[in-house]
Amino acid sequence: METRSSQAVVLRWRAYGESDKIVTFLTRDFGKITGIGKGARNSRRRFPNSLELLARVRVYFRQRSEANLAFLESCELLGPNSSLMEPERLAYGAYLAELAEQMTIDWNPVPETYDLLEEALLSLESGPATASFLRAYELKLLERSGFAPPLHECSRCQGPLAVDGDPHFGPLQGVFWCRRCASAARSTATDIGDFVVSSPLVARLRALREWPLERCRVEPFDAGREDAARLIGYLLSLHLIRPLKSLRLIEQLAHKQS
Ligand SMILES: [Zn+2]
């Protein structure tokens, strides 16, 4: 078995036995992998704090088959700096990692998704998670996973979204319609649960999906902020496999501060 290596981010880990760790990484070159670090809880030489949540690393491993756990040989620590260990940023970092984990599958490399997570964690090292930053990350992640709806045209008629009024969003389908197509969809089903989204908000979502994350992080988000969170929440919920644990942590921190 040859040794393979890749840049990676630690998505989660758990203790195994007396001294081992089972660790899940998002790697740039192999997609999501899970491996066992023998003696990892004691070996500072092979694993110098490099198997902690959100560690950016270069991991070296061997693998008999994709059905087996990888055997972790060593793991060089590349980051993060200590600012990411501040409780609120750590909680948001965990949120970014958990979303990336759920939107990726084992042994299926999507370098664009890896790059997005790395860019987001680096941005989070330089400042707090803002509403624009979080929504931008979510939209970009959906896009790179192939789940983002068109934001520039109606999903039904492919015409402009704002015709005779503001666009509509269908939360069950996760798409945008022009007003006419929303009425047509409603006439064929009893309740499609659609709601109106303002044109400026759709334009803002398009911008967040395109701008670099670091620019989004410092961009204020006032009008429509709650609507954006709700709408993207619907989009994410169509693709998440299980509830996000990190959200509970974020809520607890917010509760403590209020
Ligand atoms: Zn239409």
Image (cartoon, rainbow, N blue to C red):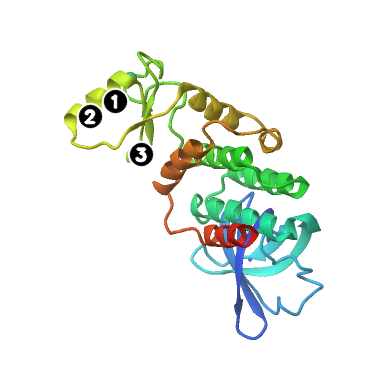
Q: Residue furthest top?
A: 164
Instruction: Please tell me which residue lies in front, 152 or 198.
Output: 198
* Callout 3 amino acid: Pro
- Mark 1 and mark 2 residues within 8 Å of each other at the beta carbon: yes
Residue topped by disc 1: 182
Instruction: Please tell me which residue lies in front, 203 or 153.
Output: 203
Dot 3 crowding, Cα within 10 Å, few <14, some 14–19, many 20+: many
On the question of residue 102 being in view, the answer is yes
Helix, strand or loop at mark 2: helix
Tell me where residue 9 appears, x and y as whole percent. Answer: 66, 56
Instruction: Give the left or right position of residue 153, taking residue 115 as reference.
Output: left
Residue topped by disc 3: 171
Q: Nearer the N terminus, badge 3 or badge 1?
A: 3
Helix, strand or loop at mark 1: helix
Label annotation for residue 186: 2
Label annotation for residue 107: none
Q: Residue at x 39, y 46 (%)?
A: 238
Instruction: Please tell me which residue lies in front, 98 or 45.
Output: 98
